[in-house]
């Protein structure tokens, strides 16, 4: 198998179904997207920072395989996970410029250029109540609105939403109260809203690139980080920090971002294939992610991670709640989006 084929090979995880070669060949021959004669070929470079073996990485692998097969070879999907094409910031910029065609990233990344859609990425903290609340916001008119704004302001289309789920606090020492959080050097993305959130809670936020977290933990540059179970396991951060507090402070959806200019340059049938297959495959990813969350936590416990609940979770929420009004003050569009999110909280 060539290196290119390896990159787009279908993952072997539970939620992905491999298809026998003879069946795939027959389905491909019958596909309405297969065309006789020479056709233009469109390279589709998918690069992201998600760890190997995580549900999002496996969904990307399946997406690439699907596009290659159902396009009749007219799309050549290439998959580069785990930061192979650059760090998170570089990948986001690459998807905007078109040096790569697709990546994954939270809507909160758009804080500087489109703060009204950044709030749907979980900012400020504690804005999402539960997974049902997330679905009511993103899997409907609000999600469509967010993608439209992203197209207009960033040059990418959010063709689907994946997720890593709720994020929690992983630290080198036990933290169950706001007092114990005081001064903790915690890695955060290089985004103001994350810095402001952890400052308000009393921690010492330290902005660092995503890929530097393991070394930063091992050298003492940071005392902890915040992440989902799958990432903690996949990047082996638990080897350097073994105290996990289930804060549920941030639910992080990952927008599947496709360069709009590249997408618009496809024939209509291939545009539909990219969008429709993304929605189907990443819906499977969300379902799989939620089904496996409990097992992922148990795996961390088996690896020696100590798990705690905050001693007063309401106090954490109350401490962060003023950020809703502060963020809404960024403008009418931001306030309107926060109002929509909060209206869906108990719908």
Image: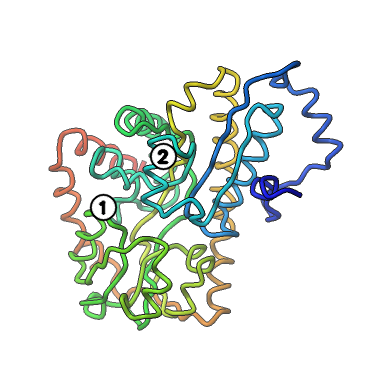
Residue 20 in the image, given as x and y percentages of width and height: 83, 42
Graded by Cα atoms within 10 Å as few (under 14), some (14 to 19) or many (20 or more), the crowding at tag 1 reads: many
Residue, disc 2: 136
- Would residue 149 appear left or right of 100 to someone viewing this image? left
Alpha carbon of mark 2 to alpha carbon of mark 1: how far? 18 Å
**Residue 83, labelled with which disc?**
none
Residue 117 in the image, given as x and y percentages of width and height: 30, 39
Taking the spot 30% from the left edge, 68% from the top edge, the residue there is 313
- Would residue 136 appear left or right of 192 to someone viewing this image? right
Taking the spot 54% from the left edge, 48% from the top edge, the residue there is 286
- Would residue 228 appear left or right of 287 to someone viewing this image? left
Image height of 297 relative to 174, above or below: above
Image height of 310 relative to 113, above or below: below
Residue 238 in the image, given as x and y percentages of width and height: 48, 76
Which of the 4 image quadrants contains residue 144? top left
Identify the coloring.
rainbow
Graded by Cα atoms within 10 Å as few (under 14), some (14 to 19) or many (20 or more), the crowding at tag 2 reads: some
Q: Secondary structure at mark 1?
A: loop
Q: Residue 135 or 114: which is nearer the viewer?
A: 114
Q: Residue 266 or 311: which is nearer the viewer?
A: 266
Q: Going from the N terminus, do you reach mark 2 or mark 1 first?
A: 1
Q: Residue 79 or 151: which is nearer the viewer?
A: 79
Q: Nearer the viewer, mark 2 or mark 1?
A: 1
Looking at the rendered image, the quarter that the C terminus falls into is top left
Image height of 288 relative to 223, above or below: above
Residue 237 in the image, given as x and y percentages of width and height: 46, 72
**Residue 124, labelled with which disc?**
1
Which of the 4 image quadrants contains residue 245? bottom left
Marks 2 and 1 close (CB-CB < 8 Å)? no
């Amino acid at each position: 198998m060539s290196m290119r084929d390896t990159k787009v090979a279908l993952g072997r995880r539970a939620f992905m179904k491999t298809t026998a070669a003879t069946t795939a060949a027959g389905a491909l021959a019958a596909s309405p997207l297969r065309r006789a004669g020479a056709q233009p070929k469109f390279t589709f470079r998918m690069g992201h920072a998600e760890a190997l073996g995580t549900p999002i990485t496996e969904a990307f692998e399946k997406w690439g395989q699907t596009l290659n097969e159902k396009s009749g070879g007219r799309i050549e999907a290439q998959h580069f996970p785990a930061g192979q094409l650059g760090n998170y910031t570089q990948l986001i910029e690459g998807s905007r410029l078109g040096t790569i065609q697709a990546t994954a990233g939270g809507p909160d990344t758009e804080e500087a250029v489109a703060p009204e859609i950044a709030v749907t990425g979980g900012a400020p903290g504690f804005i999402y109540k539960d997974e049902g609340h997330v679905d009511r916001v993103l899997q409907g008119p609000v999600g469509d609105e967010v993608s439209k704004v992203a197209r207009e302001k960033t040059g990418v289309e959010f063709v689907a939403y994946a997720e890593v789920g709720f994020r929690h606090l992983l630290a080198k020492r036990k933290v169950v109260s706001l007092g114990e959080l005081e001064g903790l050097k915690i890695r955060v993305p290089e985004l103001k809203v994350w810095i402001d959130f952890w400052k308000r809670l009393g921690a010492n936020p330290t902005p660092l690139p995503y890929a530097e977290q393991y070394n930063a933990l091992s050298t003492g540059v940071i005392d902890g980080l915040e992440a989902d179970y799958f990432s903690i396991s996949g990047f082996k951060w638990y080897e350097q920090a073994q105290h996990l507090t289930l804060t549920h402070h941030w639910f992080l959806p990952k927008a599947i971002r496709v360069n709009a200019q590249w997408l618009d340059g496809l024939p209509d049938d291939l545009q539909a294939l990219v969008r429709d297959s993304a929605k189907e495959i990443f819906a499977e990813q969300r379902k799989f992610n939620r089904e496996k969350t409990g097992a992922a936590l148990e795996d961390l416990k088996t690896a020696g991670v100590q798990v705690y609940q905050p001693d007063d979770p309401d106090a954490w929420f109350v401490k962060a709640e003023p950020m809703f009004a502060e963020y809404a003050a960024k403008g009418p569009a931001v306030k309107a989006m926060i109002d929509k999110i909060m209206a869906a909280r108990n719908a």
